[in-house]
Image (cartoon, rainbow, N blue to C red):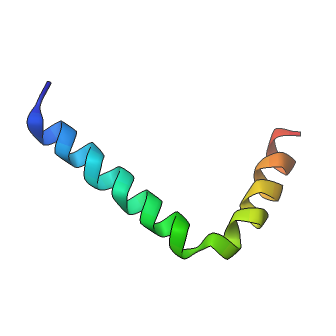
C-alpha cells in the first residue's frame, strides 16, 4: 500500500474523532436524525 494513503487515512480518522469528541452534545441529535432518515 501507499504510505501516503495510510497517513492520509490516519489524519482523516483523527480529525473526525476530534470533531466528534468536541461536539459530543450533538451526538444525540445525530442519532435521532440518522434514525429518522433510516425509518
Count of numbered badges drawn on the protein = 0
- In the displayed structure, does residue 39 sit left or right of residue 4? right
Q: Is residue 3 above or below residue 35?
A: above
Q: Quadrant of the N terminus?
A: top left
Q: Is residue 33 above or below residue 8?
A: below
For residue 5, what is the image quadrant?
top left
**Where does residue 36 sit, x and y in percent of width and height?**
86, 50
For residue 15, what is the image quadrant?
bottom left
Q: Quadrant of the C terminus?
A: top right
Q: Is residue 19 above or below residue 10?
A: below
- In the displayed structure, does residue 11 sit left or right of residue 26? left
Residue at x 27%, y 48% (from the top left corner): 10
Q: Nearer the viewer, residue 17 or 4?
A: 17
**Where does residue 12 sit, x and y in percent of width and height?**
33, 53
Q: Is residue 4 above or below residue 11?
A: above
Question: For the view shown, which residue lies furthest in the left direction?
Answer: 3
Residue at x 53%, y 68% (from the top left corner): 21
Residue at x 18%, y 46% (from the top left corner): 7
Residue at x 43%, y 66% (from the top left corner): 18
**Where does residue 17 sit, x and y in percent of width and height?**
45, 59
For residue 30, what is the image quadrant?
bottom right
**Where does residue 8 sit, x and y in percent of width and height?**
22, 47
Question: For the view shown, which residue lies furthest in the top direction?
Answer: 1
Question: For the view shown, which residue lies furthest in the right direction?
Answer: 39
Amino acid at each position: 500500500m501507499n504510505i501516503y494513503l495510510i497517513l492520509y487515512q490516519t489524519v482523516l480518522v483523527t480529525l473526525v474523532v476530534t470533531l466528534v469528541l468536541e461536539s459530543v452534545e450533538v451526538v444525540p441529535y445525530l442519532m435521532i436524525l440518522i434514525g429518522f432518515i433510516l425509518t
